[in-house]
Amino acid sequence: MVNAHQVGKVPLSSMGANHPMISARRYFEEPAAYLLSQGGPSPARLVVDCSQNTQRKIEGSDAELDVEFDPDEYEFGRLAATLERRQVIEFAAVGLALLFLPNLADGQVTEVVQVNGRTDYWVNGRERLLEVSGTQDPSRLRTRHTEKVVQGGENPRRRPYFVSVSSFVDRRSIFSFHEVP
Amino acid sequence: MTLMELLQSDAALREVMTEKNAAILEADMLKSRGDLPGAIRQYRRAGELEYQIFRYLEDTGLPDAALINLISAASCWYEAEELLAARRAAHEALERCGSNERLAESCAQLLAKIERALSFSRAGEGMAPVPEPVKA
């Protein structure tokens, strides 16, 4: 990508300090490192489409992050043995969203709540919601993003929301921001 | 005052909310790993903490913010199979939804799920203890 904004090196472990209220490292760092490590060594270059992120603090509509991680810090074997693949993808996708929020917008996840069997992530108090999804199928990235935008628009809290959808095979993501219609 | 401003100035609330977040995430992780007894314990704890936060935010003059925690308390207690506590919280939440039709619909759906589960269980079991308020 020619005109992408270079965010530079971003340690995966930074999610802990950036989101101190949600034990981010405990739940989301290892799954993210696991899937990123399957695409090659550290750092993993992520290309993020930010064209619909009106909250962005970067120039341009795309961003590149070089995510640093140390595979020796984790127990990937235990992770793979105790979680189904789709669950690893789900947790890992949240992990990448936790990297995007402070680096591509001014967001900190401050609260996790349960609503009718689903987990909602609140950003900056109750200012914004975060919708997250992940996929192993690159051809599904845009469709999945569209689905999550629709889902976010139907949120009963009627708050503006971020959507973060990541494809781990080709290390591409879409990170966007939306007002409730 | 917004919830974010309150969080920045109120260390006690920050601490309780962080503990509650951890309980929900731990419960989700345990459920994903198939450890249902462990998940139930965490959801029960999360429900108690959500209710504490609800009471505290309401007393602090943030009823709209508090309502989200009340709904989450009902949802956590439902997951913890504390159905009577879940029903009580869901009823309280529904009464507070006011003109927010989407939120009311979401509460009504949760309440219907709880009532269905209650109809398959013996009434009177699984009542959660009355939570203590957050100390500022």
Image (cartoon, coloured by chain):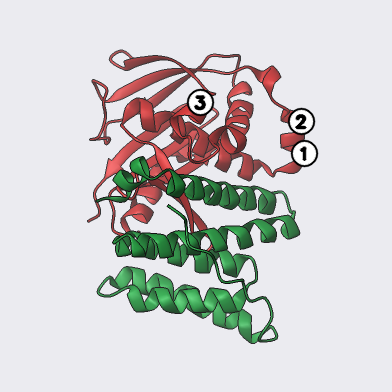
Chain colours: A red, B green
Gap in angstroms between the C-alphas marked 3 and 2: 22 Å
Relative to A31, A131 lies left or right:
left
Q: In the rendered image, which residue does mark 1 sit on?
A: A81
Q: Chain of mark 3?
A: A
Task: Answer few, some or many: residues within 10 Å of disc 2's Cα (few below 14, many 20 plus, some between 14 and 19).
Answer: few
Q: Are marks 1 and 2 in contact (CB under 8 Å)?
A: yes
What residue sits right under mark 2 in the picture?
A: A77
Pick whichever, B33 or B14, lies toward us.
Answer: B14
Q: Residue at x 49, y 60 (%)?
A: B50
At horizontal 60% and vertical 26% (from top left) the residue drawn is A33
Measure the C-alpha gap from mark 1 to mark 2. 6 Å
Image height of B32 relative to A57, above or below? below
**Position of B102 relative to B10 (above/below):** below
Mark 3 or 2, which is nearer the eye?
Answer: 2
- The one nearer the camera, A140 or A89, is A89
Determine crowd level at label 3: few under 14, some 14-19, many 20+ residues with C-alpha closer than 10 A. some
Q: What is the three-letter code of the residue carrying label 2?
A: Gly
**Left or right of residue B56: residue A75:** right
Label 1: how many residues lie within 10 Å, few (<14), some (14-19) or many (20+)?
few
Q: Residue B123 in the image: x percent, y percent?
A: 66, 86
Q: Is residue A137 visible?
A: no
Q: Pick whichever of labels 1 and 3 is earlier in the sequence.
A: 1
Question: Residue A180 or A140: which is nearer the viewer?
Answer: A180
Q: Is residue B14 left or right of residue B99?
A: right
Q: Among all residues in the image, which is located at the extreme front?
A: B136
Could you tell me which residue is drawn at 41 percent across and 23 percent down? A47
Q: Is residue A108 visible?
A: yes
